[in-house]
Amino acid sequence: MYERATHGDVSRAGATLTVDLGALVENYRILKTKLRPGVRCAAVLKADAYGLGVRRVAPALAAVGCVDFFVAHVDEGLLARKCLPASASIYILNGLPQGAEADAEAAALTPVLNSVKQVEAWSDCAAKRKRRLQAILQFDTGMSRFGLSPKEAYCLLASKVWRSHIELCCVMTHFACADEPSHPENLKQLMSFQALARQFGDVPTSLANSSGIFLDSVFHGDLVRPGAALYGINPVPLESNPMRPVAQLSARVVQTRIINPGDGVGYGLEFRPERPFRLATLSIGYADGISRALGNRGTVYFRGNPLPIVGRLSMDSMVIGLSDAVADAINDGSYVDLIGPDQSLDHFARSVGTIGYEVLAGLGPRIERIYRYD
Ligand SMILES: *Cc1c(COP(=O)(O)O)cnc(C)c1O
């Protein structure tokens, strides 16, 4: 079953991102098989569910039993709240900016508190409302990005005021090197986390992202937080991908032409073939989040046939070379795949020198999202 979801008209779209919701929920189940009984599996929905569309991704995961969801920003939380059952827990990873507490409380969003100041502000909000509010407390155990330093955590322990206003539903940390299983920092972070967590009593713990789930179960804690693996990105880069692909990115052919020896292609005329050359222009460019670094370097696919990107990418278009094998089959209105059965998301990302996360999160709003569930 196919269903259109966003604003545009698929028949006019320059490019489509087909999201396989069946594969998404299968990935959720695969991740759950890695967990000891009783360990909860959340889903990370930040950045519009890594570009795939939170409006459809969130309900699909809720329907298979996911009840804990993480986003980065308050406004992402407010949107997620509209897409999810009222019973879902929604956590704000980046914490609350000063002044956002009331909105977060009104929508029953749970902040991840990353600093003493944030703890105080949330505690004040609870005092005003005359009710205890839930929160996650994050410790920085080595990544130097979010969370309380061990020293700040001990200061917080010494102050008792916040305790009567805040109910900790979790203490958490985040691994810097979970995708490198033998990296010594993983165990170091675990040890310093456990030492801190113990001080806070019998509170559930949350440590692992997608890659962390594939480490030993001592790294899991009570609530794991996968994002990437749900969306088909390989959580174990040193091994073959255990996840099912979720996203297929296809671009429409606008026109085809044959150029003569000596003719150039695109800005700067960087590509000049020495023989007559067949070309197709695709309706996708760097404004859609496709890196300009793919000029003269990347490959797209048509029914198993690799086709080179030739010349520089433009804002709204790019040009590919057509081999004899496909010349008759590709016409105006044909679609070629940038990401699909012949080129995985991770492979495509590597060809631009980046990671699947950045490719998905960068895909622009002009790309029509199509949802498939079978
Ligand atoms: C983004 C994020 C995750 C999810 O990470 P993946 O590698 O996509 O699974 C988990 N925890 C935190 C704190 C994050 O910022």
Image (cartoon, rainbow, N blue to C red):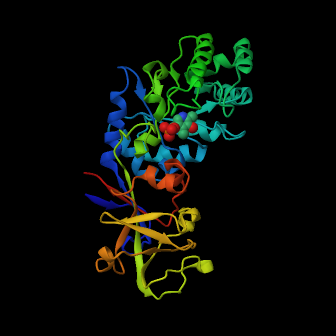
Instruction: Write down the quadrant of residue 32 in the picture.
Output: top left
Q: Is residue 56 visible?
A: yes
Q: Is residue 108 visible?
A: no
Q: Position of residue 267 (x, y in %)?
A: 60, 78
Asked if residue 289 is positioned above or below residue 91 in the image, the reply reads: below
Decide if residue 20 is on the left or right side of residue 277. Answer: left
Q: Which one is nearer the viewer's eye here, 73 or 253?
A: 253
Q: Position of residue 139 (x, y in %)?
A: 64, 24
Asked if residue 341 is positioned above or below residue 217 in the image, the reply reads: below
Q: Position of residue 151 (x, y in %)?
A: 74, 18
Decide if residue 295 is on the left or right side of residue 147. Answer: left
Q: Residue at x 35, y 78 (%)?
A: 333
Q: Which one is nearer the viewer's eye here, 248 or 159?
A: 248
Asked if residue 254 is positioned above or below residue 236 in the image, the reply reads: below
Instruction: Write down the quadrant of residue 335 in the picture.
Output: bottom left
Q: Position of residue 31 (x, y in %)?
A: 37, 33
Extreme residue toward the front, this view: 274
Count of marks placed on residues: 0
Q: Which one is nearer the viewer's eye here, 17 or 203?
A: 17
Say which quadrant the N terminus sits in: bottom left
Q: Residue at x 33, y 28 (%)?
A: 33
